[in-house]
Image: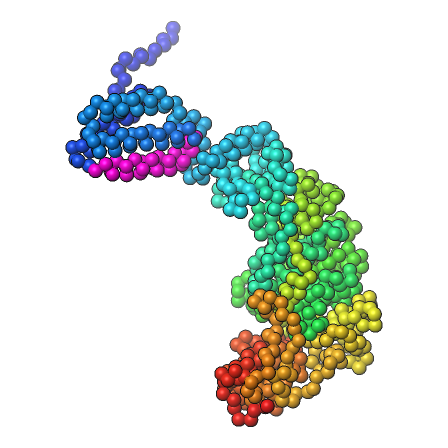
Amino acid sequence: MGTHTKKAKSTAPAPVDWSLTPRGPISATVQGSLALAAAATVGDLAALEPIWGGVATVAGALAMVAAGAHRNLPPAALLYRLGCWVGAGSWWTYTLATTPWTQAAWASLGIGAAMAGLMSGLGRVSPKGAAAARPGSAVVLRSDSAVGARWEATIRRVCRIDVVVTSVRAWDNGCGYDVQVTLPPSGATRADLAGRAEALATAADLPEGCSVEVRGVPGAGRSQVMVRVSTVNRISQTIGYPADYSPRSILEPIVWGEYANSDAAGAEVREEASLIAGKRGSGKTTLLQVVSIALGRCRDNLVWHLDLNGGGLTQPWIDVWLDGRVRRCPIDWAAPNLAEGKAMLASAIAIAKHRKASYRKLKRAHDTNLLPVSPQLPQITIVVDEGANAVADRDLAKLIGELQNIGRNEAVNLIISSLRPTGDLVPVNMRKQSGVRVQMYGPDPEELGHMFGWSTGAKLSMDQLGGKGTGFLALDGNSPRPFRGYNVLPAQVEEAALAIAALRPDLDSASAQAAGPAYASRMERMARAFTDRDGHDGQGEELGAAEAFASQPAAQQPAPKAGPRRLTVLPGGATSDASRWADLVPSARPAVPAASAADWALPRRTLHAEQMHPVTPAPATPARPLPEIVARVLGAFTAADDDRMHSADLAEVLGMTPVELADALRPYEIAPREQPFQRGGRARRGYTLTDVQAAAERIGRGEAPPAAGTSS
């Protein structure tokens, strides 16, 4: 028979706890009262000044508030502890000013201790609140604790997920707040919350147009989720484009609007192709104008326009050049018809293919597979308006598809717009290859499914937008976010065009050579296509091929009819010989005589001069005569109708060597620029008209000594 051994029950007495840790409200009250009485006794024996009681009270109260906030104590607990500190500190200060050895002092201490004990329940912290207090968690402000509790309840009710709110932070602009929550270890995911974002916004009764966005928390684990709640419908407000045309880089995101919380809305377009869709009147063309401004501000990017819808996108940009107010067209190439569009895309493909080979050493030197862009080697970004017209032609659609496939690495990119994102207007592969997608506001919610995929589009609603000029923006497959595009009016496009004309780079010589004669002669065709003559704009003229057009003798090319505009056509980037441009200028100028200051004035209307970077307006006729060499240089610039000339070219026109020219101009502080620039497909150092004009102004004011042989 087996035996069972029963463990004897221990009868050893429990150890006595001699610690001073309170075991309840009574012991805590007694210990606090004794400690306060001891402090009063020590203070009296040490003859402390009453001021020390006040200092200790304030310091203790502040430390208690900070510690309580870190522990996420509820408001009642904070107020209870604050009252204990203020009461105890006041009593101690009183005894320091009088004496603790009075009946009144001890009676008041007893009454205060009794009240603290009776109200001790207010200072207790529930287990749930203690568990929610985690080291390193953000502080939940007392005024926002109710907001956190409300969102815990809302998420529990709508999503069936028990989350814990760890922080609530208001946005700096006052348009909303962030609620950081911790997911439970039950398998709930961030996607579960994101899929119910619209339902959460409705349950929270947010204002029309406001939304809830669900994101991860940078640097935190996957259980940490940020719920972004907008409370002000920012996208319902018209937001003008900021009057800022300062230089930027294509390596930075270009900005074209604002999200609901006033964060900048835009995208990085160095590598990603973009697709923008929207019905007529949705604000799509205005958005493309803003995109053109943002791209034009980049010192390492050239903007090309492919607009088969009549050239309306380009016309405001090109007018400042046709009117002679700038010497370089802000848009490096504009194609308003089918033949020009094919020539443009063919040249872009040739550039992309040529760059793969011609700049392999540059990639190796930078230890990168991605072509390093710069002002000397700019990206080309082609903005396509009304892409449906482009893809309607099979050859043009094939060219767009090929460029989209090969141009990313070699910095030849596309931004395409269309009326709809459907397959009949935008080929599926073209949409799939677009990492940046924008769907503008419209009455048909199925457009969201076509653009972003049906699983994502079904979770979106056009009600989240604010009408014309608003849309959803998705970056590289991330959840689409509502945004408001900047509004830009024609006058501001004109301002931007004036600034960008002087800001934009030239195409590198290797790419210009690869583009061939179609690129070299593009300005002639642009001038004829966008200039009024014989009652129409010439945009409907179809060319057999751009190369054939470029090869026509100058005598056979129809010259524009002189009109109210003063047409000044200038080579931008790598172009053909300047002599080919003479018949395109209605007001012919004399050849290179010595000129006075009045001869080199360029008519221009000043717009916000402090923000513009166009060609510097000519000063008034100098009070002192110009030196002959300065006047001849100004005459050379006038005859060339350009604002920059290579040293060798300018010297040849003046019958001098480059060294002789430099020596002659040195006394007037006129020198070649340090950085080379493109002219005629060559990158060389040379002189700028603005430097010569500045020297002429100094001479006229008597700030530079006139040399022998002046021109009166």
Judge left or right: residue 575 versus residue 77. Answer: right
Q: Is residue 377 visible?
A: no
Judge left or right: residue 131 versus residue 591. Answer: left
Q: Measured from the top left, where is residue 44 in percent x and y?
A: 18, 32
Rendered position, 700 above or below 394: below
Quadrant occupied by the N terminus: top left
Q: Residue at x 23, y 25 (%)?
A: 105
Q: Is residue 482 visible?
A: yes
Rendered position, 439 above or below 78: below
Residue 575 in which image quadrant: bottom right
Depth check: give the residue in front, 360 or 583.
Answer: 583
Quadrant occupied by the C terminus: bottom right
Colouring method of the image: rainbow
Secondary structure mostly taken by the magenta-highlighted segment of the chain: helix
Q: Residue at x 80, y 57 (%)?
A: 392
Q: Which residues are magenta?
A: 49-74
- Identify the residue at the far bottom of this view: 709
How many numbered tags mark residues here? 0
- Identify the residue at the far left of this view: 45
Depth check: give the residue in front, 710 or 227.
Answer: 710
Q: Measured from the top left, where is residue 56 in percent x and y?
A: 28, 37
Rendered position, 502 above or below 155: below
Is residue 44 within the magenta segment? no
Residue 541 in which image quadrant: bottom right
Q: Measured from the top left, where is residue 282 in percent x and y?
A: 72, 50
Q: Measured from the top left, where is residue 58 in percent x and y?
A: 31, 37
Q: Residue at x 51, y 46 (%)?
A: 172
Q: Residue at x 62, y 60 (%)?
A: 294
